[in-house]
Every structure is written in structure tokens, then in C-alpha cells.
């Protein structure tokens, strides 16, 4: 398929400009101030799918943001690839740390992306990666090389838990029937070393509230005589890890799937340089669970992290006060076999049990999902690896990621098909951070690699 290379070269400026237009719409699903923009983005995605050559595209209403569904069915007896992606993005804040406005995309060169990267919220996660699939379809339709049926399902609530997507999938099993699900919403090791994501962590996200006195108090008149909810919350949170950085919640590790020494040795073969890792983050050392190395801590091991903590006085100057309440948002990343609802329950029970007399504690679950692991001997994995081998010149390495796409486990349960995670982002692309970007190299390589996946998947399915 030498043609795809020349097609990309010929059309790359347009591909980049189209993506830039999509990135200008601030589709922040977490903030209702942007709700019209989220809806407008769904419309823009619909138009792009029509232009790329889908025969049928619709905007499907849900209890939340709409799902864009598109298809091109060429022959019912051929395999069907279902492409999933999301058009919503994370909130852009803190705004002051962006070197250019998050919704005014610009191309800048970086050390890792000498040929330039598009800086904008959503450039990598996931508008840029999703749009590679739209352009790959355009190529296959234009060149008459689409070898099978294709369906697209692009949602607008991934960054807030995919509630409406679960609702939609449960109700549309027939419509979504497929032989393999293809997603580009993860990363790879580097531009020199492609990798295929074979695992995602599960997630349990909770919010806790610690209440002491019924009102804020003078910290001189009452200090020392009543429980200070902020002091207590800090103490409770600190107790959730022991000195070896193991999580102390009873039962938390009971179902964790331990990897064999062989599997861990296999993992250690993936290129990784601890000094570069520290340097990229300006750290004098890494930190984590005893007995595991960095690449294990952030993929095959479960974790517990405070994502936000607040209460009391945080304005200018000093105010002597004991707050009535303190709050924190806590996420737990889970590994295969840990059930997110069970973990949420274990956390809740434990957290309430460690509260001392003098405070009351509430735990509110937000959202969650199961982890995922996929075998590397499936037709889908093999086809993806063949595609990468052709465009990068070397085979891809299987890697378990620390991130979560909870809907992937649900796909397997409801649609009974495997997902192939062909991600083209890099960890340094700053997703969810200020200055998110996506390399032009990565974007174009993705567009080149995807049609080859289709080709090999159909060949291997015969
Ligand atoms: N695309 C990411 C997940 C991801 C990124 C997985 C990189 C692997 C590598 C996705 O948009 C995301 O941010 N997921 C959330 C979970 C969701 C329920 C809010 C996450 O992982 O925090
Ligand atoms: Mn994403
Ligand atoms: Mn994300």
C-alpha cells in the first residue's frame, strides 16, 4: 500500500487544517458552560464522516451528550471494524500555564517533535487520534481499497465517565455488531519504537467529606478542644498507604492478578530510561510501591491517589479558623480481576471505620470501570503489529498502560468483541495538562498505519 504514503504527503496540509478547525471548538464535557460547544462538535464530526465517505451518519440522542454513529457497509459477508473515539476534551485549566490559548491551535516544534506538534486541548486526547480514523477512511474510499465494513461510534462523555455510551451500547447491540473494535486513544513508547496497548487499568473515583463542628470556629477559642476536619482528613489520607507504599484498605489486594517473573522479565525488555524519566519531570527521584519498578508501578499495580483536597481558608493573607468541613477527591487505579464496585465498597467501609470520634465522614462514589487485558495472539493484534511493522520498519512491543478507558471492558461484555488499542500519542504529549500537543509525525503515521490494519485484519480473517 505505497499509495497511502503518497496520499498523505499530497493531502497533509488539508488533514492538519481540518483537525485544527475541530480543535477550535471547546468541547469540554465536564463544564456545562461549554454544552453548546460539545453539541456543535458532534455536528462537526458528523459532517467529517459524511465527507470521508460513510453511507449513513446520524447523531444519536442520549440522556447526555450525543453519540455520532456512522457506517459504510460494503458487503455483509465481510468482517466489520467498529471504530470508537471521543470528541469531548478535558477542561483546559490552569489557563495561565498554557503557552498559547488551548482552543487556538498552533504548530510548534519541540525536542521530541522536531517536525512540529499541534498544541491545543484535545489534540492528542482524543480529537487528533480519532480524526486519523476519519482520514484513513477517506483514503480507503478514495482509493477503492476499503476491504471490509466499517462503523464509527464517537462519543462526547468519555472524560466524564461514558454514562450515556453504556446506555447506548446496551440498547444497540445489533447495530454495533462487529468483528473487532479499533481505538486510538492511548500512547506508544516513542516515535522510534511503536507499541500496542494490551492493558488498561480500571478505576474507582470517590469524593470524601469530613465534618467536624457545625460551623467554622475561631481557632484560638476552640483550637485543641475539637477535631479539626482538615487535620483529620490529612491523617486519614496519610494512613491509606503504609511505609512501603502499599495500600492499607483491608481486602484491596485480594483479587489482584499477580504477574509471573517471566511476564515481568518480558515487560522489562521494553525500552525505558529512568534518568530520562526523572529529567522529563524535574524529579530527583521516583516514588512508589516497594518491590516494583516504575514501569510496573504505573501499569500492573493498583494505586490510590488524591486528586484534589480543599477546605478552610485559602484566600490571601491569614485567617485563624477551624473549618467545619474538609473534602478530597480520590482515585484508585485498578488492575485485572479487581472489581471497581467492590473496591469502592471496601474503600467506603474502611474510610468510615478509621474516622475518629469527633467527626463524621461521607463517601460519595463518582464513577468507575473495570480494567482490561487483551491477548497478543488474536487476529486483531497480529494485524495491528503487521501494520506497525510496515510503517515504522520494526515490530510493535505490547505494553500495559496505566490509563483507563472503562468502556472497553463493557464493549467486551456487551458486544463480545476484542478491542485493539492502536494509540499514536506519547506520554510527553501532556494530555489532561496545560500545553497538550500531538506530533504531526504521529498524526500522519497514524493515518498511514490504520488502512494497513484493515488490510491485514481482513486477510487474516479469511
Ligand atoms: N485517553 C485517555 C486514557 C488513556 C490515555 C489511556 C493514555 C492510556 C494512555 C482517556 O481519555 C482518559 O483520560 N481516561 C480517564 C478515565 C475516565 C473515566 C475519566 C483516565 O484514565 O483518567
Ligand atoms: Mn481519551
Ligand atoms: Mn482523557
Image (tube, rainbow, N blue to C red):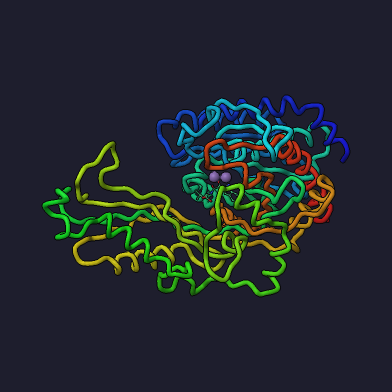
Q: Position of residue 217 (x, y in %)?
A: 15, 49
The residue most toward the front is 284
Q: Residue at x 46, y 36 (%)?
A: 93
Q: Is residue 237 visible in the rendered structure shown here?
A: yes
Looking at the figure, which quarter contains the N terminus? Answer: top right
Q: Is residue 239 left or right of residue 109?
A: left
Q: Position of residue 292 (x, y in %)?
A: 58, 68
Q: Position of residue 2 (x, y in %)?
A: 88, 38
Q: Is residue 25 visible in the rendered structure shown here?
A: no
Between 219 and 37, which is closer to the camera in this rendering?
219
Q: Is residue 24 left or right of residue 341?
A: right
Between 299 and 417, which is closer to the camera in this rendering?
299
Looking at the figure, which quarter contains the C terminus? Answer: bottom right
Q: Residue at x 71, y 29 (%)?
A: 15
Q: Is residue 218 left or right of residue 449?
A: left
Between 78 and 333, which is closer to the camera in this rendering?
333
Residue 259, placed above or below residue 101? below
Q: Position of residue 94 (x, y in %)?
A: 45, 36
Quadrant in the picture for residue 211: bottom left
Q: Residue at x 71, y 43 (%)?
A: 150
Tag count in the figure? Answer: 0
Residue 258, placed above or below residue 217? below
Quadrant in the picture for residue 363: bottom left
Amino acid at each position: 500500500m505505497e499509495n497511502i504514503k503518497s496520499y498523505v504527503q499530497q493531502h497533509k496540509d488539508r488533514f492538519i487544517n481540518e483537525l485544527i478547525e475541530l480543535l477550535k471548538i471547546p468541547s469540554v464535557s465536564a463544564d456545562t458552560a461549554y454544552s453548546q460547544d460539545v453539541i456543535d462538535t458532534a455536528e462537526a464530526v458528523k459532517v467529517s464522516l459524511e465527507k470521508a465517505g460513510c453511507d449513513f451518519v446520524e447523531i444519536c440522542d442520549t440522556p447526555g451528550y450525543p453519540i455520532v454513529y456512522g457506517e459504510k457497509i460494503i458487503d455483509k459477508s465481510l468482517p466489520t471494524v467498529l471504530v470508537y473515539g471521543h470528541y469531548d476534551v478535558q477542561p483546559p485549566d490552569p489557563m495561565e500555564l498554557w503557552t498559547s490559548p488551548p482552543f487556538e491551535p498552533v504548530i510548534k516544534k519541540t525536542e521530541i517533535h522536531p517536525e512540529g506538534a499541534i498544541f491545543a486541548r484535545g489534540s492528542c486526547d482524543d480529537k487528533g487520534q480519532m480524526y486519523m480514523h476519519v482520514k484513513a477512511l477517506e483514503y480507503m474510499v478514495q482509493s477503492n481499497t476499503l476491504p471490509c465494513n466499517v462503523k464509527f461510534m464517537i462519543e462526547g462523555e468519555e472524560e466524564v465517565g461514558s454514562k450515556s455510551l453504556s446506555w447506548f451500547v446496551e440498547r444497540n447491540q445489533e447495530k454495533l455488531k462487529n468483528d473487532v473494535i479499533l481505538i486510538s486513544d492511548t500512547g506508544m513508547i516513542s516515535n522510534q519504537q511503536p507499541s500496542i496497548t494490551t492493558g488498561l487499568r480500571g478505576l474507582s473515583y470517590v469524593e470524601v467529606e469530613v465534618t467536624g463542628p457545625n460551623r467554622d470556629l475561631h481557632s484560638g477559642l476552640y483550637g485543641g478542644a475539637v477535631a479539626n476536619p482538615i487535620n483529620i482528613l490529612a491523617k486519614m489520607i496519610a494512613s491509606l498507604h503504609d511505609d512501603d507504599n502499599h495500600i492499607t484498605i483491608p481486602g484491596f489486594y485480594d483479587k489482584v492478578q499477580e504477574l509471573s517473573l517471566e511476564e515481568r522479565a518480558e515487560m522489562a525488555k521494553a525500552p525505558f530510561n529512568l534518568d530520562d524519566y526523572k529529567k522529563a519531570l524535574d524529579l530527583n527521584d521516583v516514588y512508589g510501591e516497594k518491590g516494583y519498578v516504575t514501569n510496573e508501578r504505573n501499569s500492573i499495580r493498583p494505586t490510590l491517589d488524591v486528586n484534589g483536597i480543599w477546605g478552610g481558608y485559602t484566600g490571601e493573607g491569614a485567617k485563624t479558623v477551624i473549618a467545619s468541613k474538609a473534602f478530597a477527591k480520590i482515585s484508585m487505579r485498578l488492575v485485572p480481576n479487581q472489581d471497581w464496585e467492590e473496591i469502592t465498597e471496601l474503600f467506603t467501609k474502611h474510610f468510615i471505620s478509621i474516622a475518629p470520634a469527633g467527626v463524621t465522614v461521607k463517601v460519595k462514589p463518582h464513577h468507575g470501570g473495570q480494567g482490561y487485558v487483551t491477548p497478543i495472539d488474536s487476529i486483531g493484534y497480529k494485524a495491528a503489529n503487521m501494520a506497525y511493522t510496515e510503517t515504522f520498519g520494526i515490530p510493535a512491543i505490547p505494553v500495559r498502560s496505566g490509563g483507563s478507558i472503562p468502556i472497553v471492558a463493557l464493549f467486551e461484555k456487551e458486544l463480545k468483541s476484542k478491542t485493539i488499542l492502536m494509540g499514536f500519542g506519547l506520554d510527553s504529549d501532556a494530555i489532561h495538562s496545560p500545553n497538550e500537543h500531538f506530533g504531526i509525525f504521529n498524526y500522519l503515521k497514524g493515518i498511514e498505519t490504520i488502512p494497513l490494519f484493515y488490510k491485514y485484519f481482513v486477510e487474516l480473517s479469511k
